């Protein structure tokens, strides 16, 4: 991991054990990033927000976790981001202001800087986008190419633009498999 092109692991606020971070992962504010154990962040991922990642999380190639220094993203245990997911914890309104991170807030439009929270066992499908101030509760799943504009309740699968309810996930089976896996880790 020390061969990363953009930062040194020692710059992170916290990094657990058995962590793999791709050589081309870019973390703009490494001092705002906490990573648990057994985490993989694949190449070409870009992170420009305060970020807390729990244990056993995978972030696939090409994801963007963005929003700036004052936004926050948290990812719960056993959660997964498929390739090219965007977690946009900050966004401009694109209507009446300069939409650039290079200008002070008083020159921007209605900027929304917030938080995105993913509970445990969340999955977000490829090429999906989650907007600011959204919570995906435990077990929430998002189908590929979806736009998440509102919170997703526990153990539900949502998909589409905007994302909407499709069906319930099998909570009991997922948690049963987690228990079996945990029993084999000791």
Image (tube, rainbow, N blue to C red):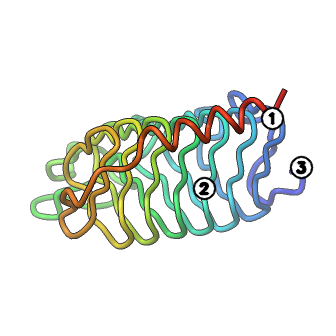
Q: Residue at x 60, y 55 (%)?
A: 59
* CA separation in Å, label 1 and label 2: 24 Å
The percent position of residue 106, horizontal first and vertical second, equals 20, 43
Residue 162 drawn at (x, y percent): 18, 64
Q: Position of residue 137 (x, y in %)?
A: 34, 37
Q: Judge from the rendering whether residue 122 lies leftward or rightward of residue 89; answer left or right.
A: right
Q: Residue at x 51, y 49 (%)?
A: 48
Horizontally, is 81 left or right of 142 in the view? right
Along the polypeptide, which appears first: circle 1 or circle 2? 2
- Viewer-nearest of discs 1 and 2: 1
How far apart are the alpha carbons under marks 1 and 3? Answer: 30 Å
Q: Nearer the viewer, residue 96 or 55?
A: 55
- The residue under label 3 is 2
Task: Tell me which label, 3 or 2, sits earlier in the chain.
Answer: 3
Q: Determine which quarter of the picture holds residue 78.
A: top right
Element at badge 1? helix
Q: Looking at the picture, how far across and down is residue 66, in whole percent?
A: 44, 52
Q: Quadrant of residue 163?
A: bottom left
Dot 1 or dot 3, earlier in sequence: 3
Say what secondary structure mark 3 lies in: loop
Residue drawn at (42%, 40%), measured in percent from left and top? 171
**Residue 46 can be seen, yes or no:** yes
Give the label on residue 59, or none. Answer: 2
Residue 110 vs 16, above or below: the answer is below
Q: Write the residue at 76% across / 53% down.
A: 21
Secondary element under disc 2, as helix, strand or loop, is strand
- Return the residue at label 1: 184
């Amino acid at each position: 991991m020390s061969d990363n092109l953009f930062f040194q692991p020692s710059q992170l606020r916290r990094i657990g054990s058995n962590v793999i971070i791709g050589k081309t992962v870019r973390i703009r504010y490494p001092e705002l990033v906490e990573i648990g154990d057994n985490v993989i962040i694949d190449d070409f991922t870009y992170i420009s927000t305060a970020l807390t990642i729990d244990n056993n999380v995978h972030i696939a190639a090409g994801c963007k976790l963005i929003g700036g220094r004052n936004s926050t993203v948290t990812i719960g245990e056993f959660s997964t981001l498929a390739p090219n997911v965007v977690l946009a914890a900050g966004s401009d309104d694109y209507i009446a202001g300069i939409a650039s991170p290079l200008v002070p807030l008083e020159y921007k439009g209605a900027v929304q800087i917030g938080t995105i929270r993913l509970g445990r066992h969340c999955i977000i499908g490829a090429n999906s986008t989650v907007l600011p101030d959204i919570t995906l509760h435990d077990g929430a799943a998002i189908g590929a190419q979806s736009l998440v504009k509102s919170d997703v309740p526990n153990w539900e699968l949502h998909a589409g633009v905007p994302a909407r309810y499709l069906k319930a996930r099998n909570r009991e089976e997922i948690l049963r498999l987690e228990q079996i896996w945990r029993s084999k880790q000791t």
